[in-house]
Structure formats: C-alpha cells, structure tokens
Amino acid sequence: MLSLDVKIPKKEYKIHIGKKLFDEADTLLKDFCCGKKVCIVSDSNVFPLYGEKVEAAVKGAGGDVFSLVVKAGEEAKSFENLEYLCREIIRHDFTRSDVIIALGGGVVGDLTAFCASVVLRGVTLIQLPTTLLSQVDSSVGGKTAVNIPEGKNLVGTFYQPKMVLIDTDTLKTLPPREVACGMAEVIKYGAIRDKKLAEDLLRGDFEIENVIATCCRIKASIVENDEHDKGERMLLNFGHTLGHAVENYTGYGTYSHGAAVAIGMCAITEWSEKSGITEKGTYAMIKKLCEKYDLPTHIDNLAGMTGAAMHDKKRSGSKISIVLVKSMGDSYYEKVDVALLESIAKG
C-alpha cells in the first residue's frame, strides 16, 4: 500500500493506494467510523459490486451503517438528488460527528461531497473512488458540485475529505470507455507537470498504482498552495474550458468527460504551437497519447460550441482563464478575451 499526505493547513488527510484495500478497509476506517452513524452513498452500477463489502468493513470498524443509492450517470449530480441525500441523512438522526462515505466515480464523489459539506453545515467525508478518473483527480482536492442546465459543476463548495482510500482492484470492473476517460486526466498531469509520466504513458511502461500516486502527488502539491482555485490550481483545468463547452453543447453523456477534455487539450495545444507559444512536437505527443488510450482528438464545429464557455467558472467579465503548455511538463495559465476561444477552437 502507498500512502500520501495532503497537507492543507488544519485540513490534513491521507490518501491510501493499493490492491484489495477494501478487504482491509475496516482497519483504515476504524478511527473515523467507530461508534458513529455512517452513510454510504453509491450508485446503481457501483453498489452491487462493492456495497456489501464496504458495509461489512464499516461494521467491522464499529460503525452503524446504512446506504443510499442513486441512479448511475451524470444526471445524478442534481439538486433533486442533493435534497434526497440530505433529507434521508437527517431522517437517520445524523449528528455533525457522523460520517458520509462516497463510494463510486466522480459523479458520486462530487454529489456526496457537496452533501457532506452542507448537511448539518458539514459532516465527516471519506472518499472511496472506484474509477480511474476519480482516483487520479476528482476524489482529491475538495471540489464538490452539482450540475444545472446552464453548465457543469457551476454550483458547489470546497470541502476536503478526511481520508481517500483507493482500491485499484476496482479498475478491473471498469468498461473501456471509463478507463479512457480516466487516462485523459492522467495525460493532463503529464502535460502540465511531469514529462516523465507522459513518456512512460507513451511507452506503456508503468504500474497503475504508481501512476495514480504520481497524479495524486501533483494534485496535492497544487491544492496545498491554492485550495480555492484562485491561482496555481487553475493549471488542473488544462483542456477543460473547451472540454466543458463540448459536454455542454453536445449534451452530457454524449462525450465522456475525459473524451471532451482530450479534445480540449489537443485543440488548445495545436493552436498554441502554431502561435509559437508551445515547443514544437508537443501537440503531436499529446495527440499520440490520446490516440494510444482511445480518446478522440478532434470534433467538428468546436468553434461553434465555444458559446457554452460563457458560463464557465473561470470566466471573469470578458476574460477567461486558459491553461497553456510551454513544453511537456511545463505549463502556465493566463486570462484571455472570451472571443479568443473561438479562434483557438478553429486551430
């Protein structure tokens, strides 16, 4: 088992990564769950696979456990489900010392974390991410959200978990589309901070536990410096501004989050390389990485989708923050006119 520390002042927590960690989860959960009411939140895909095992672990840790299951899919990140979770938790006589566990991918993690941050004005949250995307990215760092018709993740909070427990055996049950979705975020980390990671991915020479740990270390180091997304943390949005526009325009679920981000990373890097901002060959490497891991690199009419970015969280007036890569592993962000996005999308 690999263990990492996230050292946000007064919000420190550990990330545990390894095979079969759900089998020893009772030991890892004991400090948080013993003598507490514990609500596991999962979805209709994940709970049948791991729900009973995690419930048994919580009981073994001395917790009084019950579970709530939402329908799987991006549409689960809704105000309706947020209200459902909050009301059910209150009905179970929760107190602020009790515990909510998110068991699932990024959708469940974001929704559950939002609930934990607001119900009773905040209860203990533990993340048990089961998809590659949530293991390398969304379970770490404390962003929570639900979606609204105007855009993805536009309503949410910052709320750190008390622990993240990553059982890499859960990746064995993922469909290929979900694996590819997570690999987009892994490629992102290589592009913004770790050239060696990108090179290892290109060769296919890696152990998944080490890849996850590398991504979590990068994210933890960034979040420690900028918890609330005011500066350096914006680097984590590489490819996301255009990616969110693709998701919004085409309808959530048409393209996975990772597929949309891959399109965004390729589009912005192709433009920045042509503009002399990015080292030659960087776009080709990112494109090759996306193709290797079954991610799209282009979509027709991307420029026509950029209007969806008007509701992006990174917009301020007529400006929006975008992330650019100077060379693999070296990135920065800057504010540009929203109108420039259409030019970028045109390549």
Image: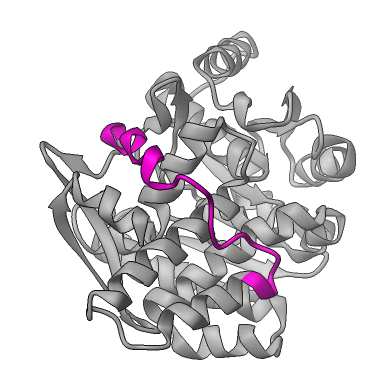
Which residue is found at the position 74% from the left and 41% from the top? 62
Residue toward you, 321 or 342: 342
User: Is residue 205 in the magenta section?
Assistant: no
Residue stretch in magenta: 291-311
Which residue is found at the position 62% from the left and 66% from the top? 183
Give the quarter of the image for residue 211.
bottom right
Q: Position of residue 187 (x, y in %)?
A: 53, 72
Residue toward you, 185 or 171: 185
Relative to 22, residue 150 above or below: above
Residue toward you, 28 or 151: 151
**Residue 124 makes an appearance in the image:** no
**Residue 105 makes an appearance in the image:** yes
Which residue is found at the position 80% from the left and 44% from the top? 54
Q: Position of residue 84 (x, y in %)?
A: 60, 12
Q: Quadrant of the N terminus?
A: bottom right
User: Is residue 309 in the magenta section?
Assistant: yes
Residue toward you, 165 or 208: 208
**Horizontal side of residue 12 vs 294, given as left or right:** left
**Horizontal side of residue 325 vs 58, given as left or right:** left
Relative to 304, residue 322 above or below: below
